[in-house]
């Protein structure tokens, strides 16, 4: 598997994921959509711990520097990204009791746990580093942007727009994939692209990356296999 094949795999999954989510979200009532976002909030809370867990098991220092920077972006001066999420939910009409008291479903908890389990150390170091970077880039950046590209259209029905959103719209824009694998860009996805490509210096590693991409999609998309 070469870089163009990996790109084609990623782009095909992204397109399929977006189409499936558009159909799913279109069928949701307003109440179901809100309940989905309240569950989805728990996957947002797991973002930083997943980055920390992934970084802890790695040895590739160049990759770790980039990953640390992305993780640290979650806590800029002032409100954190989690506070921005609450801000957006309030604009949608949710009260603080609903936001704070909604517990994760068993399925949501299982989905989050499966992602941590995937990042456990079960292979030689170089392959482990590739697995971690692939998962964090594809599942927690690229596919998140795909999700939010669908969500933001429905969020407009609740008065949340690009102008007043502090979480969904900014994450849709700064997480997205804009360049092919191997070309560094400014979004979180593209910040990791060049470094990941440099790690895929054999056909075996590139093939493993392809498998990790598919598994990352399975782990991410599995969240939606529940009733809201």
Image (cartoon, rainbow, N blue to C red):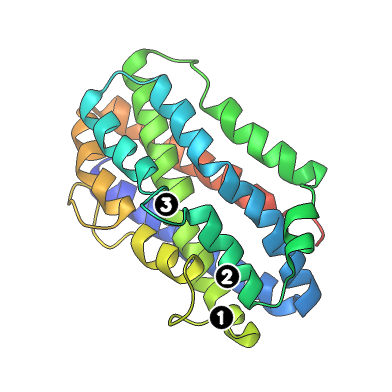
Neighbour tally class for label 1: few under 14, some 14-19, many 20 plus, Cα within 10 Å: many
Instruction: Looking at the picture, tell me which residue is in the foreground, 30 or 115.
Output: 30
Callout count: 3
Q: Earlier in the sequence, mark 3 or mark 2?
A: 2
Residue 201 horizontal/vertical position (percent): 19, 28
- Residue 39's place in the image compared with 59, above or below, is below
Is residue 108 visible to us here?
A: yes
Tell me, for residue 160, which label it has, or none. Answer: 1
Are the residues at dot 3 and dot 2 in contact (C-beta closer than 8 Å)?
A: no
When asked about the image quadrant of residue 31, the answer is: bottom right
Q: Pointer 3: what residue? A: 141
Depth-wise, is mark 3 or mark 2 nearer the camera? 2
At mark 1, the secondary structure is loop
The residue sitting at the top extreme is 124
User: Cα distance, mark 3 to mark 2?
Assistant: 19 Å
At a point 39% along the width and 51% down the height, the residue shown is 9
Q: Which residue is disc 2 drawn over?
A: 88
| Residue at 49% from the left image edge and 39% from the top image edge | 48
Which callout, 1 or 3, points to the residue nearer the camera?
A: 1
* Residue 16 visible within the image: no
Please state the horizontal and vertical placement of residue 76, each as a whole percent of the image: 37, 51
Residue 3, image x and y in percent? 24, 45
> Residue at position x 47%, y 47% from top?
140
Does the CB distance between marks 1 and 3 fall below 8 Å? Answer: no
Are the residues at dot 2 and dot 1 in contact (C-beta closer than 8 Å)? yes
**Quarter of the rendering containing residue 83:** bottom right
Closer to the camera in the image, 41 or 138: 41
Disc 2/disc 1 C-alpha distance (Å): 7 Å
């Amino acid at each position: 598997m070469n870089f163009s094949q990996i790109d084609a795999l990623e782009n095909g999954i992204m397109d399929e994921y977006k189409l499936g989510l558009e159909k799913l979200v279109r069928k949701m009532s307003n109440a179901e959509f809100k309940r989905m976002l309240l569950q989805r909030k728990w996957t947002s809370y797991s973002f930083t711990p997943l980055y920390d867990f992934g970084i802890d098991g790695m040895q590739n220092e160049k990759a770790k520097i980039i990953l640390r920077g992305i993780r640290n972006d979650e806590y800029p001066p002032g409100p954190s990204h989690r506070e921005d999420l609450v801000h957006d939910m309030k604009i949608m009409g949710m009260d603080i009791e609903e936001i704070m008291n909604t517990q994760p479903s068993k399925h949501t908890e299982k989905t989050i746990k499966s992602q941590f389990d995937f990042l456990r150390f079960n292979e030689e170091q170089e392959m482990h580093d590739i697995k971690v970077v692939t998962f964090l880039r594809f599942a927690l950046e690229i596919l998140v942007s795909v999700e939010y590209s669908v969500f933001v259209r429905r969020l407009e029905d609740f008065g949340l727009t690009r102008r007043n959103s502090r979480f969904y719209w900014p994450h849709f824009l700064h997480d997205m994939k804009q360049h092919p694998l191997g070309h560094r860009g400014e979004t979180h996805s593209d910040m990791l692209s060049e470094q990941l490509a440099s790690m895929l210096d054999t056909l075996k590693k590139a093939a493993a990356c392809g498998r990790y991409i598919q598994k990352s999609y399975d782990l991410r998309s599995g969240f939606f296999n529940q009733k809201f």
